[in-house]
Amino acid sequence: MSSPIRPPDDLPASGAWRPGDPVGDRRFHEVTPGRRFSLEGGGHLGHVELAYETWGTLDATASNAVLVCHALTGDSHAAGRGGPGHATPGWWDGLIGPGRPLDTDRDFVVCANVLGGCQGSTGPASTDPATGEPYGSTFPVVSIRDMVRAQASLADALGISTWRAVVGGSMGGMQALEWAVMYPDRVRSLVLASTTAAASALQIAWSHIGRMAVEADPRFRGGDYYDAAPGDGPWRGLAVARMCAQVTYRSDEAFSERFHRSVIEQLDFTMDPVFDVESYLDYQGLKLVRRFDANSYLRLNRSMDLHDVGRGRGSARQALSRVSAPVLVASVRSDGLYPPVQQRSLHDDLQSLGAEVEWVDIDSPHGHDAFLIETATLGPRIADFLDRHVPPAGAADD
């Protein structure tokens, strides 16, 4: 049987950013200089850095700062072109920039690669100061709360005591929600898109399948593969995990409309890819391999499973009662992975607890990915929500 994916010879063992690679628009923040960073699940990291990017200018009162939190395979490059240091254009470029919903002529927008990531922040591909080698298999499991505590250190370093808004979708929405629970006095408004108060059994199940695909790859080597030659890393496992996730991110309607049963060239009774949708998934899998790291995929994926805003706080309602900021909750009708019932539950719980909360219902065929794709629909609602609830400094004088 032939291989379903034929990788190029230059496929890296890891797509992680490494010191010495082009920096691009990244900046770096040392989270705990001279101290260890303790983790929610136990243990610690001896040295933690966050890679981050900013757009716009922080005003004199530091009141115009907006934190954008990225999803599973995102990074700090939320806006801007691709190029040296950035494998792809900004993942939310339609929302961030001059005249856009997060208007960088007015707002100071910040996005940090999460702790455990692979695009400049401390993660499994980073050098362990205790050994001088990549952490690899020894890198601990981190939580959404760990990510947020690291981001709070960055906010302190930037001189930001409160965010005008914290905005995120999917895993980014988990971070945004934790910000409002952990640091309610530091969040003036909150935008939660296609996210949940706690990971569901179905979400955990899909995550488990993806992680098993990575770990089953013999080239994964238990997580210690960073010295592998091009083409000899765990590309197949990571690609399959991505393909599996890609199917859950879109809807049947979107796949049927785009691919139907069309074939690449001609119908062939072999095991080789013959349908357009197979070729599309192969492409998406290998594309991720070039810019991501298998160990980071496992750790961040697991952090999403562990997400439960009520953990250790009595209940989800008790945790949500700490949210003092106005909230915009957005859902996508066709999202089968983070279905609207989760966002409706979050909305209703916040409303019953007395929070100012609004709802956006996005009618899109694009499934979970719609929060990234439908910026023309989501963006104006975000801009309107922020202008009404947290008008920028000087707005009353305009």
Image (tube, rainbow, N blue to C red):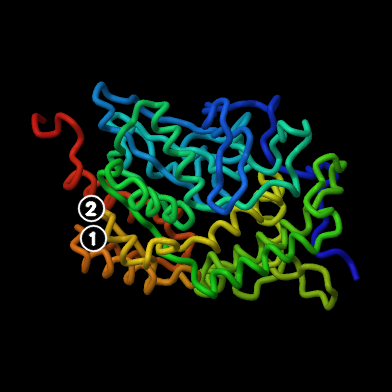
In the rendering, at what x and y percent does residue 368 appear? Answer: 48, 64
Q: Amino acid at mark 1?
A: Glu
Few, some or many residues within 10 Å of mark 2 (<14, 14–19, 20+): many
In the rendering, at what x and y percent does residue 99 appear? Answer: 30, 36
Q: Is residue 100 left or right of residue 284?
A: left
Quarter of the image holding residue 329? bottom left
Quarter of the image holding residue 284? bottom right
Instruction: Pick whichever, 184 or 10, lies toward us.
Output: 184
Q: From where the camera sits, is residue 99 visible?
A: no
Instruction: Pick whichever, 348 or 94, lies toward us.
Output: 348
Q: Nearer the viewer, mark 1 or mark 2?
A: 2
Q: Amino acid at mark 2?
A: Pro
* Whether label 1 touches label 2, CB < 8 Å: yes
Few, some or many residues within 10 Å of mark 1 (<14, 14–19, 20+): some
Quarter of the image holding residue 238? bottom right
Q: From where the camera sits, is residue 115 visible?
A: yes
**Picture quarter with the C terminus:** top left
- Tell me the residue that label 2 is attached to: 326
Label at residue 358: 1
Instruction: Identify which residue is drawn at 25% across, 31% down.
Output: 63
Residue 307, above or below 131: below
Instruction: Identify which residue is drawn at 69% across, 56% down.
Output: 285
1 or 2: tag closer to the N-terminus: 2
In the rendering, at what x and y percent does residue 391 appear? Answer: 18, 39
Instruction: Identify which residue is drawn at 66% across, 72% down.
Output: 262
Instruction: Identify which residue is drawn at 60% across, 44% down.
Output: 117
| Gap in angstroms between the C-alphas marked 1 and 2 | 8 Å
Looking at this rendering, what residue extends furthest in the bottom direction?
269
Q: Is residue 66 left or right of residue 367?
A: left
Residue 189, above or below 79: below
**Picture quarter with the N terminus:** bottom right
Q: Secondary structure at mark 2?
A: loop
